[in-house]
Amino acid sequence: MNFLADHALFDYISISDYDTPGAGSTSGRPCHFTLITENSMKAIRDNARKLMEKFCYVCPVCNGRACAGEVPGMGGLGTGSSFAGNVQALAEIKFNMRLIHDVIEPDTSVTLLGRKLALPVLAAPIGGVSFNMGGGVSEEEYIEAVINGCKAKSILGCTGDGVPEFIHGAGFAAIRKAGGHGIPFIKPWEDEELFKKIDLARESGAEIMGMDIDAAGLITLRKMGIQVSPKSLTKLTEIIRRSGMKFILKGIMTPDEAELAVEAGADAIVVSNHGGRVLDHAPATAAVLPAIAAAVKGRIAVLVDGGVRSGGDVLKLLALGADAAMIGRPFSIAAVGGLQEGVENYIDTLQGELKQTMVLTGTRSAASVDRRILFSRE
Ligand SMILES: Cc1cc2nc3c(=O)[nH]c(=O)nc-3n(C[C@H](O)[C@H](O)[C@H](O)COP(=O)(O)O)c2cc1C
């Protein structure tokens, strides 16, 4: 499918070459790139809405309200408050606007775990296309779109895990095909299964792997009678050592557990409540991030996810202490709606938004973001 060939060109020639209100250029110069991206994203989202019917409503803002309780599906668990809270907390953070400076071409790149990323964003691990997204594309098509789209735009895509087996199988295969470019995440299985999956993750050629320890509470696995569990510090240390890879621990929500992750030998944590899918009434990730970053930043890379919907949201989280952000559901919508081109367009959109917000807050580099770009009443 050459999705954009069908949609983008028409959009491009039908609109002005110059700044359009809301089109994203601050320069007064032509902004073809932004215009193409914005109009293509609309077509991609419209396509996703059709393909994900009854599983995801592709709402104007992906905020967890229309899909509350829809797990399996794309929603948050129970009342959906943890998912909605993530989005809400980010929406409540405001920027100080500053324009008397010389930041015109900000640098969006960062180095994370030894890898240079064009922007501080990773596609979060998401799997289960058939029972979470309606199966409009296959698991293989989906995950290849995510991994290859991220690779083409010089960021990293992650792969998910679960039951049935083909979820992680498709992920490992996509990373292998992409020459090891990607991060496989596995669930906190019990011993034998866990070590088998770690070996498979290594064989994918990836240098970095992760475990979503919070999936110990995942209802979709429990319903299938699968054994996942929390891990003691001793066990976690053994798992990380045994992996022999750079290791990301996903699902950290308190400073004390961030300290334990450092002690266990993790290279990075993801401050995450699994997009609100494991525990109802969990706090928002943006709310817990500052204390966690204050506790461990510099000793371990700090990633965060949950409700990140724009380049501006990414910048807010960097200002609160994150080194990079993961984004979940919007990548799924882009991948289902436009496959690899959808993912690439979404990344272009994010990078455009990030750059613009950096200019308007006087932020020169994504690698060093000043907390004072955020508005505070005090
Ligand atoms: C349908 C679905 C499937 C998911 N599967 C996984 C998974 O296999 N492994 C994992 O670590 N996280 C999984 N997650 C959680 C995401 O990685 C991420 O933490 C979350 O989606 C971030 O929130 P956001 O979607 O609001 O950006 C899943 C999330 C969704 C919505």
Image: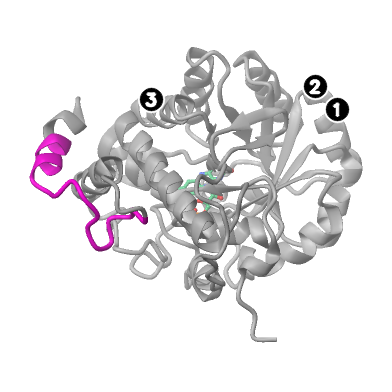
Which residue position is annotated with label 1? 241
x, y percent for residue 361 = 55, 63
* Residue at 42%, 59% in the rendered image: 75
Mark 3 CB near ligand 1 (8 Å cut)? no
How packed mark 3 is, by other alpha carbons closer than 10 Å (few <14, some 14-19, many 20 or more), is: some
Q: Is residue 88 visible?
A: yes
Q: Bounds of the magenta span? A: 7-26
Q: Nearer the viewer, residue 104 or 319?
A: 104
CA gap, disc 3 and disc 2: 27 Å
Amino acid type, mark 2: Gly
Local crowd size for mark 2, using a 10 Å CA cut-off: few (<14), some (14–19), many (≥20):
some
Q: Which amino acid does the dot numbered 3 rest on?
A: Glu
Of callouts 3 and 2, which one flags the residue occurring earlier in the amino acid sequence? 3
Label count reads: 3
**Residue 108, quarter of picture:** top right
Above/below status of 357 relative to 136: below
Residue 208 is labelled as none
Q: Secondary structure at mark 3?
A: helix
Magenta stretch encompasses residue 10: yes
- Residue type for callout 1: Arg
**Residue linked to disc 3:** 140
Q: Of helix, strand and loop, which one carries label 2?
A: loop
Front-most of residues 59 and 39: 39
Answer left or right for 34 relative to 221.
left
Q: Is residue 279 left or right of residue 24?
A: right
Q: Main secondary structure of the magenta part?
A: loop
**Horizontal side, residue 15 vs residue 45: left or right:** left
Residue 248 is a magenta residue: no
Residue to which mark 2 is pinned: 244
User: In the picture, residue 190 is in which quadrant?
Assistant: top right
